[in-house]
Image (cartoon, rainbow, N blue to C red):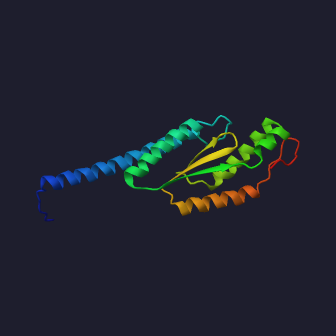
Amino acid sequence: MPEFTLTQLTPAEEVERLRRELEQAQARIDDLMTQLEVANASTTQAGDDLPGFWTTDLLLKRLDDELDRARRYDKQVCVLIMQIDGWEHIVRTHTPETGTIALRAMARMISQFMRRSDLAAEYAGDCFLIIMPETPLEGARTFGERLCQAAESLHVFDVSRSRVL
């Protein structure tokens, strides 16, 4: 038969034990909320119909939540803003629809590089905002460099098969 001993905790030890349990429970709740929001975001598409991307308003709210979470648990979070060079020229030279084609192509490319925990939205027409929870600066830098390399090799054509990007 197993033996065990009971130890009575001091009030301070009991408070510390309960504080640790509360922190663990809050971290679990935060993780579940993130999973729920990511699941909901996959059904909420951005104004330009970019599947898997959040609307800007939802992403900015999520950014506030991620920054609060990073402060509370002493975690890192990085935010990357990626702008499409020449997007305004594409829209002026071709059509707004061609600009949308370019945005969708960039969104698909960005999605291929993102982790499940990363969140993205179109931002200010020709930019993408990407939130990377629990990512150190060097990891975000590497991610951004990989995105830039992929974007340089991305070719986008309009409906008439003319290369626009």
The residue at the point 65 percent across, 54 percent down is: 112
Picture coordinates of residue 122, whole percent (x, y): 64, 42
Q: Dividing the image into 4 quarters, which one contains the N terminus?
A: bottom left
**Residue 43, how many percent across, how many down?**
58, 37
Left of 150 or right of it: where is 80? left
In the rendered view, does 133 fall on the left or right side of 92?
A: left
Q: Nearer the viewer, residue 90 or 8?
A: 90
155 left or right of 51 in image? right
Numbered disc total: 0
Residue 44, image quadrant: top right
Q: Position of residue 24 (x, y in %)?
A: 33, 51
Residue 47 in percent (x, y) is at 65, 34
The residue that appears at 63% across and 56% down in the rendered structure is 113
User: Which residue appears farthest toward the top when viewing the image?
Assistant: 47
The residue lying at 15 percent from left, 65 percent from top is 2
Is 77 situated above or below 53? below
> Residue 121's quadrant in the figure?
top right
